[in-house]
Image: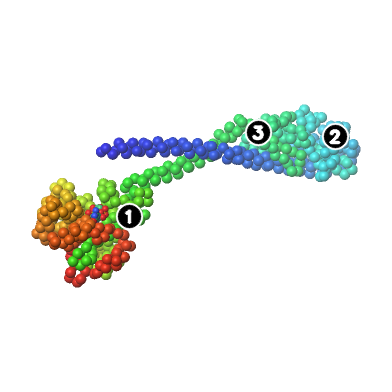
Amino acid sequence: MGSKPQERGKQAGFNRVLLRDIAVIYLLTFVVGVPFYFWKLHSDLSGLGQSALSRIDLFVEQTTHSLAPLVSLPKTCTSSEIDQLRQTVFHSYRVKEIGLINPAGRVFCTSNLGNTSIPIYNQTLSRWRNAPDGRTLALVRAKTGKTHSLFVYLQGPHDMGANALIPPDVLNELVGKGFPFPDLPFAVKVAGNALAGSVNAPLEVGAMHETDRFSFYSAQNPVELQFQVTPAFQRSYMLEHSWIPLLLGTLFSAVYTYASRRRVARQSLPATFEWALKNNELEVFFQPIMDTDLGGPLGFELLLRWHHPAHGIISPMIFIPLAEQLGKIGALTDFVMETAIGFIQENPELMKSRYLAINISRQLLLDEHFAERVCRRCGRNQHLIRHLLLEVTEDLAFSDAEMDQAITQLHLLQQHGFRIAVDDFGTGYSGLDLLRRFPFDVVKIDKVFIKELLPEGNAVALLDSMIGLADGLGMVIIAEGVETAQQADSLLQRGVNHHQGFYYAKPMPQSALVAWLARSGASEPAEGAVTVEV
Ligand SMILES: Nc1nc2c(ncn2[C@@H]2O[C@@H]3COP(=O)(O)O[C@H]4[C@@H](O)[C@H](n5cnc6c(=O)[nH]c(N)nc65)O[C@@H]4COP(=O)(O)O[C@H]3[C@H]2O)c(=O)[nH]1
């Protein structure tokens, strides 16, 4: 009952830490996202700048191409020549006026004015005359227009030439095609003169501020394209792209939440047992049960060990009660049972007339299918049953109904051929009652009585009465916790010759068992001397 508020408290604590971590993840994603955001802005602008410049270059190319037939016209500016100029303008939807240029550097004939004489700026003229491909551009105020316009110049034979006037909104159109930032200020600078504006605002003479300026240059024409990345633009760009860190933050948070929950779930006690079983952290140790007449083992008790990766070896005294509480004892017992069956099958010679003792938790006896399950586990190898001794502790601490249920299971097991031992005998308060209710095959006298085997102690009297009781009921006696030669002798004097204890051997892993058997010179029980019939 008391654990529920505690669980809820733990959950709330976990949620608080999780929320804090998620907040940190979002913050980090945004902070780490800033350089990414600058890189993305730069790469977006550079892509847009380069494609705008290529559109301008292509346009210049097409315009000079349309001027090419005109540069060889005579210097006369007759009506047929003016017509030809007008035809060209008519067929171009961007060029508004075309002029013919004489060797003196003056426009002598235009599509709009006919005969005229307009000087070309010296700077433009010298750039044009020196251009290796005979063409150049200029941003100048046309005689016929109020604003600055773009002029494309093409040189012909004998220092003749032609130019085409293009209104500034064409530049706007060329830069703005597919441009996603219609309000981003930009400027097109042609040979030193600049027109500035934005896709949404007409271009006018002006320049960009030096700060926050991104510039791109044409390789073919004297054109520089500048973008003014104002703080306001940066803010709106960042807002527009905030979905990227938001998405990444959400993704990272989801992964983190999943991993945290998995980690916590794995650390939860029930999952810890499953994890331990799956990852071979549990191992069964073998402790010999000696027949002192024979000088060798007549069986082995199987004792679980948990090699915890963080806490080292954990005693079964700690984890067995826990496994019982958490309902995991069945899985652990199954594991021990499988180990026992495997061991008997793999070592037929060694196990010919020996047994393995397995501890059965009292809780399992309350399962009405337990006996049936254990028998099924032995499958077709029912002969294995005679090699198994099942130990149940004396202190079953059951209600009457539960005790009936447990006794039923014990009877079923015994009927199937399992030998049943009462473990830790003498330590519980229901020992005698239990012996009255069930005919155990073996009684294992608890180590506390062996430890205090002093001639003058009360333990001796108790031990003697237990021995008398067991003999009277026809049960085999095993003395647990034999640690010294004196204890062994004293037990022998009382006719107890089945001993288990550190004096003979401590519980050991299966790998050490063969070596121990060889070392101790334990021979096979003589035919008829000691058998699995404990
Ligand atoms: N001081 C001393 N101790 C000795 C001596 N000889 C043997 N022991 C220890 O006494 C315990 C005997 O097992 P237990 O009474 O069934 O008591 C077992 C048993 O009740 C339980 N247990 C162990 N494995 C399992 C299992 O697979 N299933 C269940 N349900 N319980 C298990 O954990 C208990 C403790 O097991 P262990 O720590 O292995 O402790 C073992 C063994 O190492 C000795 O000379 N001196």
Q: Quadrant of the N terminus?
A: top left
Q: Nearer the viewer, mark 1 or mark 2?
A: 1
- Is 200 left or right of 401, judged from the image as shown? right
**517 over 173 or under it: above or below:** below
Mark 2 — residue?
Answer: 122
Residue pictured at 77% horizontal, 34% vertical? 192
Question: Residue 113 at what x, y percent from top left?
Answer: 84, 32
- Specify how the rendered protein is coloured: rainbow
Of 255 and 240, nearer the camera is 255
In terms of image quarters, where does ligand 1 lie?
bottom left
Please tell me whether mark 3 sits on a helix, a strand or a loop: loop
Up the image or down, 328 lies above or below 169; here it is: below
Residues at marks 1 and 2 touching, judged by CB atoms closer than 8 Å: no
Placement of the C terminus among the 4 image quadrants: bottom left
Graded by Cα atoms within 10 Å as few (under 14), some (14 to 19) or many (20 or more), the crowding at tag 3 reads: few
Residue 414 in view (yes/no): no
Residue 342 lies, with reference to residue 138, above or below; the image says below
Residue type at numbered disc 2: Asn
Residue 282 shows which numbered tag? 1
Q: Which residue is mark 3?
A: 212
Measured in 3D between alpha carbons, the distance from the residue under mark 3 to the one under mark 2, in whole angstroms, is 33 Å
